[in-house]
Image (cartoon, helix red, strand yellow):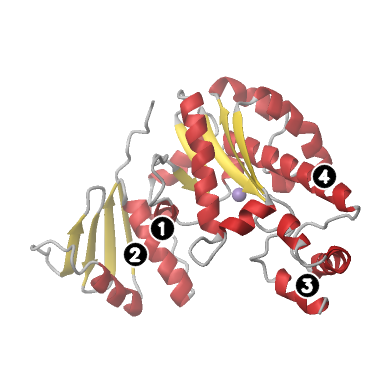
Amino acid sequence: MKFDKPKQHTIVFKVSDNIKEKMIKHYEDMKCEKTPPYAIFQVKDFDCVTTLYESGKVMFQGIGADIEASFWTEQERVLNNRLIDTESNKKDKKEEKKTFINVSSIGSDEVGTGDYFGPLVVTASYVSKENIAYMKELKVRDSKQLTDETIIKIAPELIKNIPHTTIILSNKEYNDYHSTDINMNKIKAILHNKCLLSMVEKEPNYEKIVVDQFENPKSYYMHLNNVPKKVTNITFMTKAEDQCMSVAASSIISRYIFLREMKKLSEKYNITLPLGASSKVDEVGASLVKKYGQDILKDIAKLSFKNTEKIYEMTK
Ligand code: MN
């Protein structure tokens, strides 16, 4: 197995007062005895050194800097509605992004998380350097930018020629898993990890592993706490489909399989199941419940969505 050579990163930004307080509490039991000048504390983790200064500036250094910092930028976003751009802190980030297009990579992406009806589909693909020209020829791009017709044309080619693993989580399975402890992102993390594991074992000659980011890296790994085998040398990227061929392939394959499953479900119940989670979805859901009873939703929809209550309301 080949691993990326770890990159040393430094990320610095100023935290808001409430986050500063939270950090002091969070790192309370981990801080070093010695504190650098003007610092409140310093914590040395095995892959990241975190230093908080009196001024409110925080510095993350080391190969785990991304993951550690992302936990706090996420807090800023959720609690203070504040977006912190840690990218601009990393001079090598742009360079790094460019290099993803032309390397052998394993990449994963999912479809169905925004759709009330239909399964969750996750795919991980391996695109070798040699296959990149072929991918460009096929005009492989982000599946969201492609029409369903194009996807139906390209995807079978990819399925034939690009090594991949796809997991389809049926609605019944999704509804059984989903609980107060297991949210959508946790389910996604577990499925991505499963697909990636299988590809890493089948195709060990990759240079990079890329996941189209749906969660900050620290939370992603926290979701996998109880999973015995996990892929850890992942680069998380937003809009990864544009920058990484294997993620683009995975997004197209997932989309294709999702559409196929939706067609099957639609045929089974003799009604066109709409995509998304709009009021159109509620209408179709209500007419199905009237015809087959409430239990029908367990087999064709993601009950955790707000649509479920609306549909129950409509069919009272
Ligand atoms: Mn995605």
Q: Residue at x 28, y 77 (%)?
A: 21
The amino acid at mark 1 is: Thr
Residue occupying image coordinates x 44% and y 40%: 96
Task: Tell whether circle 4 marks a residue whose Cβ is less than 8 angstroms from ligand 1.
Answer: no
Disc 1 or 2, which lies upstream in sequence? Answer: 2
**Res 312 seen here:** yes
Query: Mark 2 falls on what kind of element?
Result: strand
Mark 1–mark 2 distance (CA, rounded to whole Å) = 8 Å
Point out residue 9 in the picture as x, y percentages from the top left corner.
31, 48
Amino acid identity at mark 2: Phe
The residue identified by callout 4 is: 264
Q: Which residue is mark 2?
A: 13
Identify the mark nearer the N-term, 1 or 3.
Answer: 1
> Residue 13, position in %: x, y?
34, 64
Nearest the eye: 65 or 118:
118
| Residues at discs 1 and 2 in contact (Cβ within 8 Å) | yes
Disc nearer the start of the sequence (4/2): 2
Q: Give the camera-side residue of 145 and 214.
A: 214
Mark 3 to mark 2 CA distance (whole Å) = 45 Å
* Secondary structure type for disc 4: helix
| Residue nearest the viewer, comparing 165 with 66 | 165
Looking at the picture, does residue 165 appear above or below residue 31? above
Q: Could you tell me if the residues under marks 4 and 1 are in contact, i.e. CB atoms within 8 Å?
A: no
Secondary element type, mark 1? loop
